[in-house]
Image: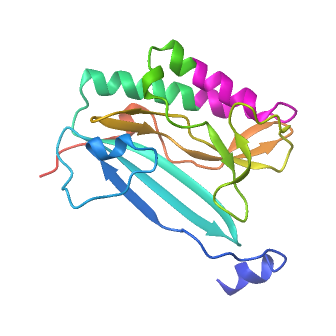
Amino acid sequence: MKIMYEEHADLMLVQGLASGLVYSGARSAFPHGMPTGNPVKRGESIILSLGCRVGGRAAESERTLFIGEPSKIQLDHYAVAYEAQRMATAALIAGHTCASADNLALAFIRDSGMSDYLLHRVGHGMGVMFHESPWVEAGDETILEPGMITSSEPAIFVPGFAGYRIADTVLITARGPDSMTHYACKIDDVVIGSMT
């Protein structure tokens, strides 16, 4: 730990959230839902939300996981969230605007018939704070530049049922977006088997 702080002595260490949240079922239909005392049930999806700091810099990751085999409706929802997140990450290109990534991914969600389930932008900048400018949302015409770090987290939230969020920390490079989150998110990787 001491070596890490010496290596990053030029960075300011800021206290803040560096932990995780797990919220499930209908509670996950809120963009930043908080956990409750309700136990997770077989057939529900859960959102695992993690944040950490390295050398005073923020990073985050979120995954939707399924407890048991997902239903057809859960698979349909997840497929849209997965593709929107893939598109959003691919659109985080140096020289393009923040708004362009948001417009592309959210248009895909709307075109998939899920407009009513949109409650969140594609993402935000990360650095000293977990949420800072630029905002990867419609209207933010900030030009993405190599070295910037943003989240990529378009999601859908179905009231009273579930939320579906996949979030990565993405480094903008001259060669294209570089997702620094490596935890798998394909459907076969996010189904948790038996809860016995």
* Residue 57 x/y as whole percent: 70, 66
Q: Is residue 115 left or right of residue 14?
A: left
Q: Is residue 19 left or right of residue 40?
A: right
* Residue 89 x/y as whole percent: 65, 34
Q: Is residue 85 left or right of residue 190?
A: right
Seen from the viewer's position, the closer of residues 4 and 79 is 79
Seen from the viewer's position, the closer of residues 115 and 58 is 115
Picture quadrant where residue 103 is located: top right
Mainly helix, strand or loop, the magenta region? helix
Seen from the viewer's position, the closer of residues 141 and 112 is 141
Task: Say whether residue 58 is magenta.
Answer: no
The residue furthest bottom is 2
Residue at horizontal 68%, vertical 63%? 129
Up the image or down, 12 lies above or below 52; here it is below
The residue furthest left is 196
Residue at horizontal 79%, vertical 76%? 8
Up the image or down, 48 lies above or below 65; here it is below
* Residue 181 x/y as whole percent: 59, 49
Residue at horizontal 24%, vertical 26%? 71
Which residues lie in the magenta part? 86-107
Task: Say whether residue 102 is magenta.
Answer: yes
Q: Is residue 103 left or right of residue 75?
A: right
Up the image or down, 43 lies above or below 79; here it is below
Residue at horizontal 69%, vertical 87%? 2
Quadrant the N terminus occupies: bottom right
